[in-house]
Image: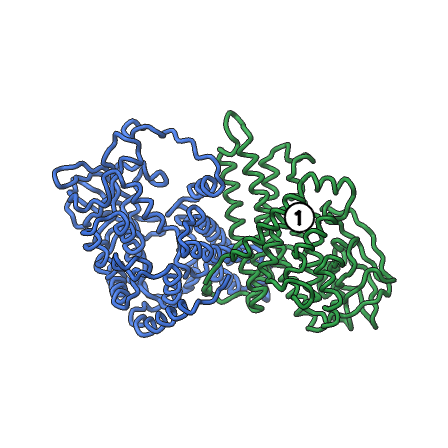
Chain colours: A blue, B green
Amino acid sequence: MDFNDTPEEAAFRAKAQAWLAATAPAHEIAEGVKLEDSDQVRRGRAWQRALSEGGFAGITLPKQFGGQGGTVIEAVVFAEEEARYRLPKGPYTGIGLGMAVPVIAKHGNDAQRAKFIDATLRGDLTWCQLFSEPSAGSDLANLRTKAVRDGDDWIVNGQKVWSSWAHESDWGILVVRTDPTVVKHKGLTFFVVDMKTPGIEIRPIKQISGDSDFNETFFTDVRIPDANRIGEVGEGWACCMTVLMGERLGSGATKSGVLPLIDYAQATPRGTGTALDNAAVRLALGEALAEERGGKYMEARLRTMVSRGENPGALAGMVKLSYAGRQQKALGLAMEIRGPAALAAADDAATDSLHYDYIWSSVMRIAGGADEVLRNQIAERVLGMPGEIRADKNLPFDQLK
Amino acid sequence: MNFDLSDEQKMLGEQARNLLTERSTPDRLRELIDAGAEWDESLWREIAELGFLGAAIPEEHGGLGMTQLDLGVISEEMGRANVALPFFSSIVLAADAIALAGSEAQKAAWLPRLASGEAIGTFAYAEGAAGWDDHAVQARWQDGRISGVKTPVADGGIATVAVVLVKKDGKRALALVDLGGAGVGRTRLASFDQLRAHYSLSFDGAAAELLDAAPAETVIAKLFDRAAVQAAFEAVGGTDACLVMARDYAMERQIFGRQLASYQAIKHRLADIAVLLELARSNAYFGAWAAGESDDDLPAAAASARLTANGAFEKGARENLQVHGGIGYTWEANCHFYYRRERTLAASLGGRDLWADRLIAHLPGTQVQAA
């Protein structure tokens, strides 16, 4: 075990630091500034272009696909250094880099790689993910949006939901049903779709936070050329798994969620001292912090595994599972610690973000693998316990209830 | 950057695991309890010969000079096999106190004997319900002799030497007492953990040397922190054992026409324990690194390892028994060994309130540092 950089890692870190110091400040967004979505995406594209020109886009992507061919640890080192700046990064560039590029690199053909990968690395293309549907969330393979072959095209009809940033995306990664006569996982096919194609309608979903980060996306007789099919017909499920693998492993530059709450308790007067003097408060927040630190070092273990070519599998879900529930609990506790003043605060940025974060924490337990799904995966794949009884097993999709 | 055990450490763990699970079987543990034994003496000789006792003791004092992480690998196996051995008292506490605070002469006198297993040490810190903080310690050192009562003291019956937390000139200090000398009284107490005998040790002018090669409070803090990390490894091993037991039982047991393990009520419970276990293990690894390499990181690292490992073992030991149902409450099922040992770890070295305090008092910066 060694927490220090190897000489190669140290050299890479120095190179990244020097480049960031020269390049990043011009791209920073000042603290407290809330940009319009379109401005945020424009700034995000510009930063992505800078990364690409600096040789830091697609660090772990093999060179043959236009990436840097670097190691997982280099990507972590870069993410750590990059996180020292307030840069325009979010799903608007992250989905393309973390989901679209890997799936096109792995399952796409040469023409598709040439068309999409470099343009995405350069920030010219932004992407959204068109997977979930009203009746297909945790049970993704139950999706109903269908595509029917028509000459060189496919005609797509159906509805997708929870498509983050679809309204600001150039292209989407899309999974649809192309054969309802086989069992549900086998009848899926994967596409990339130009979001400006006629027949695509994007409607924002108003969330409980009041924001609209997500959308419903409707497909009405949308024509997608067969050239935009990724992988074979019927290979859609394998493509989805490639995408979802990328969703699990963090970059290693995550900021603490608990330390700000400890600060918040300390900024709450209680008697002659602060709420943090209270033993019950210290215990609850101390336990949350200890667990969070465990998650951080767990991620370091997983990255070591990945850097050796091992697949952490369901182990990677552990960090997310513990994170989401812990944050919801600790954020809720922080509101109680502050008391009535947590319910309505004038000019208190910490309370404002607490409101937002507490509301947001509810979806963290659902998005990217719901708590219950992750528990099943851990029980089945880590502990080797029996799989769930599946009433739809071996039944063709069109015979399901 | 590399966050994993080395191949050598994995082999060490495997070697310890094979030996301890083979020797320290549940039937052997029952046999020891039935005989009223305080420890598994023959196993102690065996692990001494293999060098486990001297693993982290410097080579010049008869040990192998390995790291705190190597010691942690062994501690994990001690926890997994729920051993009846004074490893924690003698090696993790007493030997470490002597290594941290002893003079060259004291180290030369005791560390080789502790490493060989010929001497057994213990750390006498608590004074009943009052505990061991500055207000609680009444035992006094004066002019080479100590007086007072320390209770309870783990492995106090078999120990040949004790590191005793005393007051000297009104301040806490560590004293080294040869328990074979005059002025030492030992009374065996009814102990919650049937595989770890606790004693009351009374000192009435017993000859004692101070361990004062380093400032007492600094040593005490580091001793507790490093012991907390090793106890966390022990808890990790215990949790893993409980998880495997519960899983295996649930896989075998049929209920309402299917495997008990096929119910989400059981799957999700064990999945949660698996998560707690891996988070605790990750904290323990970092704690062991900090224990050897970084005094600045150690308090928060030790407290985090302590809180998460005890939290995991608490749930592991309880839910293992629960998953077994009524049979878990029987002497012949093996859940009870862990159910008791878990509380032994939880109540030793201070409860969660104390360690949460320690963590909050040693907060790192608000930006999580690079691993």
Estimate the x, y position of residue A341 in percent, counting from the top left. Answer: 48, 59
Q: Return the residue found at the far left.
A: A151
Quadrant hosting residue B60: bottom right
Estimate the x, y position of residue A90 in percent, counting from the top left. Answer: 32, 58
Q: Say above or below: A302 vs B264.
A: below
Q: Say above or below: B91 vs B17.
A: below
Quadrant, the N terminus of chain B? bottom left
Q: Return the residue found at the far top.
A: B257
Task: Name which residue lies at 19% across and 40% down.
Answer: A156
Quadrant hosting residue B74: bottom right
Q: Is residue B351 visible?
A: yes
Closer-to-camera residue (B336/B95) = B95
For disc 1, the neighbor class at 10 Å (few under 14, some 14 to 19, many from 20) is some
Closer-to-camera residue (B251/B69) = B69
Task: Name which residue lies at 50% across and 43% down.
Answer: B271
Q: Say above or below: B5 vs B81.
A: below
Q: Position of A52 compared to A288: left or right?
A: left
Q: Say above or below: A271 vs A336.
A: below
Q: Position of B61 compared to B199: left or right?
A: left
Q: Position of B260 compared to A92: left or right?
A: right
Q: Chain of mark 1?
A: B
Q: Which residue is mark 1?
A: B343
Residue type for callout 1: Arg
Q: Is residue A224 visible?
A: no
Estimate the x, y position of residue B174 in percent, counting from the top left. Answer: 74, 67
Task: Name which residue lies at 54% across and 49% down.
Answer: B277
Q: Secondary structure at mark 1?
A: helix
Estimate the x, y position of residue A397 in percent, counting from the top left. Answer: 29, 31
